[in-house]
Every structure is written in structure tokens, then in C-alpha cells.
Amino acid sequence: MKVMTSKELGSRIVKQKKTLILDVRNTDEFDDWKIEGGIVEVINEPYFNLLDGVDPVAQKLTKDQEIIVVCAKGGSSEMVAELLEEAGFTNVYNLEGGMRAWSEHLEPVKIADLKEGGSLYQFVRLGKGCLSYFVESNGEAAIVDTARMTDVYEKFAKEQGVKIKHLIDTHLHADHISGGRNLAERVGGTYHLPPKDADEVMFKYAPLEEGNDIIVGNSAVKVQPVYSPGHTVGSTSFIIDDTYLLTGDILFVKSIGRPDLAGKAEDWVGDLRNTLYKRYKELSDDLIVLPAHYSFAEELGEGGRVSARLGDLYERNAGLQVDDENEFRKMVTENLPPQPNAYQEIRETNMGKINPETDIQKEMETGPNRCAVEG
């Protein structure tokens, strides 16, 4: 039986290779969170339906078809893959580590070469829809919204021949554990956080405030903070190279950020509207929006990148089309998906109040991101 890694699967998806997934988790788990993107077909057949043989799924498959079998952690899928091989299926793979491993994979995608030298990369966390950013210039790098799996960024920096100097969070995250502070300690870099999100943090940080630009590579690349509250009270966006607008969890390609993950929806909805309908409106329509998340597989563009022109979003993003303030308030306080898994514990981890073991952190992050109004 063959094994496929999350890295190999991620590469297939961003390259738009036709992929068939047989997901053998329970239907409720599958319905909540599945592998998506690219040219992916997914069949769900719970493992317990296949204990007496693969007949329930065999008629949906062909014997020489490439099949990638997936479960939560890789054990049940391995057994199903073996049953398929015994039934004569010749091209079966088991996804190593299952959905837990898939949740942790980061796929680096180059966004652009920058005007004065250097490059901007988007790290796509395909299993959770999280996006982080790596800016490098003249031997230095900054990372925005670092994921928990910091070794990926360290390896990438080494390959690029750059030193990581700045670790930046656009806000205090509630859907995933930030790796920014830990990576800053590992590499001797500076960890930046909006002070209005840092009232309860238990560690030192550099205040992230509008007017205090962060310079990467001497003076080559300017990371310009733009205070943009609404998802949190401290949410801060960035303009990079006068071209790219990193919007954090305020604005996505097909949706907008939710204001309720700290229990402050009614308090923050006004801030959210002001940011989206006034503050961003003052910016150039030609800025390229690079969000911290995506919610839908169709948001993955060429090479797996997630981006859109700001002016285009004002024409087609439904969250930016609500002229009536009361209707907007209703939309962002009532039309919400379930809150992320263990979001309160994740917030406390990101504050430094608790420090769970690695396995518990992985479990806390299991499942899709739910930072958008319409998930």
C-alpha cells in the first residue's frame, strides 16, 4: 500500500491536478470539515460501513483509479486502503497522519517580486483556510500571522538566505494558535501585536500602531500598519510596497470578518462597518487584498494564491453591499456560523495565560476556520 503525505497532496491541489478522496470518517465530522480545493472529488463512506468489505463504495470507483483514503489520524484509512487493495484496486494511497496532519500543512505560494527588491509569499494552510505572509528583502524577513508550525518558516528562511527579524500578528487570534511569539524567541526577532488586543497578555511585545512603519531589509520594503478594528478592537491591516493590503480577518475575498469571537459583537459592529465602509474606502481601489483566511475552495486562484483587487471586492463582495446600517448590524450579529473549536482556549494560549502540550494544541485547532460572517 502506498502512502501520500500532506505536502504531496497540497502540491497536487494547488497545481489543479484531478484528485479523488475517499473520506472514511463519520458523516458529521465530514460535513463539518473536509479536504477541498482544486479539482477535488470527495466521497464520504464511514469506516464502520466498510468493516465487512468495500462493496458499499466499490461501485463508485474503478479498479485502476487513483484513490487517496483519509480519516482523522491515518489509522482507519490505512485499514480501508488495505481492504481496497485486497479487492483488486491497484492505485490506492493512505493519507499519512490523516486530517490532523492535513490541518498542519503549509503551502508556500509566491505572490510577487517587490519594487525595490525582495519578494512576498503567501503561506496557504489548505486544511484550515488560514493564510500567513512572508516578506523578505536584503537578507531580512518579516512574517505576518505566523501559524503554530514555525519550523516551516525557519526552513523557508534558510532556503531564501534571510534572517527573520519581525513576527507580526494582525490581531489576537481566536481560531488558531499563533507561532509568532515562539518564533521570535527562537530567532531573536521582535514580536509585534496591536496594543488594544494586548490588555491581558502575559508577555512583552512591540506595540503595533499606525504611523510606526516596520522596515524589512534596511529601507527596501515598508510594512505600513493601518488601524482597522472590527474583528477585534485592535485589528490592524498592512500596506506592503504600496501595492498589497493585508487585511487580517477584517475583509476576505468572498466575505467579511465576524466581530463576536471575544463576546463583543454588539460593541464592535460599528468599528467593523467603519473600517469596511469608510477606512478601506479611502485607500486605492488598485490595492491587492491579501486576507488572513479564506472560507471557500473557489477562492484559491492560480497556483493556490488567495487575492483580489480592493475595487473589485467593493463591486462583488456581498458584505460590502449593505447600505443600511441596521441591516449590516443584523447580518454580522445574527448570520454567523458556529464559533471555532476551542476558541476561548486558543485566545488564552495566544495571551500567554495557558501553555497546553503540543498534542492538545493540535486538538484545539482541529476543524475549519470560522472567522467570516458567512462560513
Image (cartoon, rainbow, N blue to C red):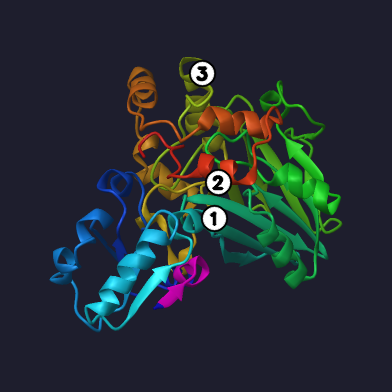
Residue occupying the point 43% across, 63% down: 301
Please name the amino acid that badge 3 sits on: Lys
- Report the number of discs: 3
Image quadrant in which the C terminus is located: top left
Q: Position of residue 361 (x, y in %)?
A: 59, 42
Per the rendering, the mark at residue 264 is 3
Please name the amino acid that badge 2 sits on: Lys
Inspect this view and state whether residue 289 appears.
no
Residue that sits furthest to the front in the current view: 52
Residue at mark 1 to residue at mark 3: CA–CA distance: 29 Å
Q: Residues within 10 Å of mark 2 (few under 14, many from 20)?
A: some
Magenta residues, start to end: 2-10
Classify mark 3: helix, strand or loop.
loop
Image quadrant in which the N terminus is located: bottom left
Classify mark 1: helix, strand or loop.
helix
> Where does label 2 land, which residue?
362
Please name the amino acid that badge 1 sits on: Glu
Residue 334 higher or lower than 241, as above or below:
above
* Residue closest to the eye, 192 or 361: 361
> Where does label 1 land, which residue?
104
* Residue closest to the eye, 177 or 2: 2
Q: Earlier in the sequence, mark 2 or mark 1?
A: 1
Residue at mark 3 to residue at mark 2: CA–CA distance: 27 Å
